[in-house]
Every structure is written in structure tokens, then in C-alpha cells.
Amino acid sequence: LWAVPLGATAAIVSKALAVGLGKNFLNPAALGRAVLLLLPSLRPAALRTAEGNFLMGYLDGSLGEAASLLLLAGAVYLAIRRLLPLWITPAYLIAAFFTGLALPHCDAAAVLAWGGTLLGAAFLSADPVTTPMGRWLQLLFGIACGVGCTLLAYYGWGIGGICCGILVVNFLCRAAEWAAWHIGL
């Protein structure tokens, strides 16, 4: 019962520190989840790799990552409403699939069926405030998120690697923006 308010508080504090609506440095939802990963009592569940029936949610894990079919339905709804960035989400999923193919003993189809992958591709990486503006930058952002999240999930972070991968790519984007602004690129 205490984990949800703690994660929500971390997300709200990150938004408050951004000093204004639409000026988030990092994705607040991913940051709230990452803060929870730091707690020893919650870490074993997050570090566990997803096993079970992904589409129907017959597996252990966080509620938001349990039923891939419901996450997919939400992504389709957002795409129909034209709220899903069509440069980021497909690039993320394609990059995650090919990264899964390249990893030893990894089922690339299962990587796509992870609820965390769908959550990251359709919802976390698609945050309009923490993503780049141009189509090519969005394409690169999606690819970087797909590769980074899959690698972090596969090599030790389990389902928690999705939010950490998105935060790493958010940070790299902000660092590149800062350098471009201050160097004059």
C-alpha cells in the first residue's frame, strides 16, 4: 500500500522541479517506477523476468505489465485517436524485436509480448513532453528506447529495465539538447 504513493510522489516531485507544465526533464511515470526499483523490498519482483501467458496476463508482475492484450488494445485506441506517435512506437517495437533476435537464448517474439515492452513502446516512450520533436529524431528516439530497454531488461534488470532504459534515453536526449543549445549546433 505504501509503494504506490511513494512512486506517485516521486513522479509529482519531478514534475514540480521541472518548474512548469510541459518542461519535464525525464519521464515522470518512468522515474516514479525507477525510484521504486531502488527499494530492496520491491526489487525482487521487478528483477524477475516475465514468464507465463503474456497476452492474457497469466503471469506474475506489476498490474500495468500483466495483460499485454489490454495494453495492445489501449495502444490501438490511442492510434485510432491519433494520440500515439507513429514514429516512436513502431521504431521501438522493431528495435526491441531485432535486439531480442541478436541476444543469446532470447525469444524475440516473447520480447514483443512482454507487457513491459508494450507499456514502454505505447505509453512511456510516447510521452509528448520528454520526446524529441522532429520525425527523424523521434525515429532515433524510438530505436534507442527499443534497444536500450530490451538490453536492460535482458541483462539483469528484468521488467524494471523498461523504465530505466527510457530514463537513460531521456537523459541522453536532454544532454544532447543542452550541448546543441550551448555549443550552437
Image: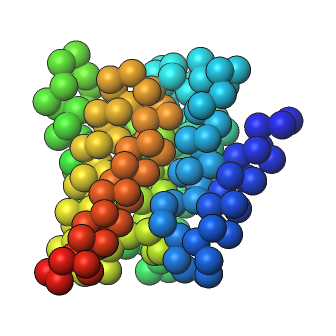
Left-right relation of 146 to 31 = left
The quarter holding residue 171 reads bottom left
Residue 123 position (above or below residue 127): above
Q: Please identify the quarter of the rendering in which residue 137 is found.
A: bottom left
- Front-lying residue, 171 or 97: 171
Q: Please give the name of the residue rendered at 70% of the width and 20% of the height, measured from the top-left corner.
A: 41
Please count the marks in the image. Answer: 0
Q: How is the image coloured?
A: rainbow
Residue drawn at (76%, 44%) of the image: 6
Residue 128, how many percent across, how many down? Answer: 46, 74
Q: Is residue 23 visible?
A: yes
Left or right of 169 on screen, residue 184? left
Q: Nearer the viewer, residue 169 or 184?
A: 184
Q: Is residue 104 left or right of residue 31?
A: left
Left or right of 63: which side holds 115?
left
x and y percent of residue 7 in the render?
70, 46
Which residue is at a point 20% across and 37% down the rendered structure image?
99
Q: Residue 164 placed where, x, y %?
A: 44, 42
Q: Quadrant of the N terminus?
A: top right
Across and down, in percent, residue 24 comes to 53, 70
Quadrant (top left/top right/bottom left/bottom right) for the C terminus: bottom left
Asked if one can make out residue 78 in the rendered structure from this viewpoint, the answer is no
Q: Residue furthest front?
A: 182
Q: Residue at x 22, y 55 (%)?
A: 143
Residue ranking furthest to the right: 1
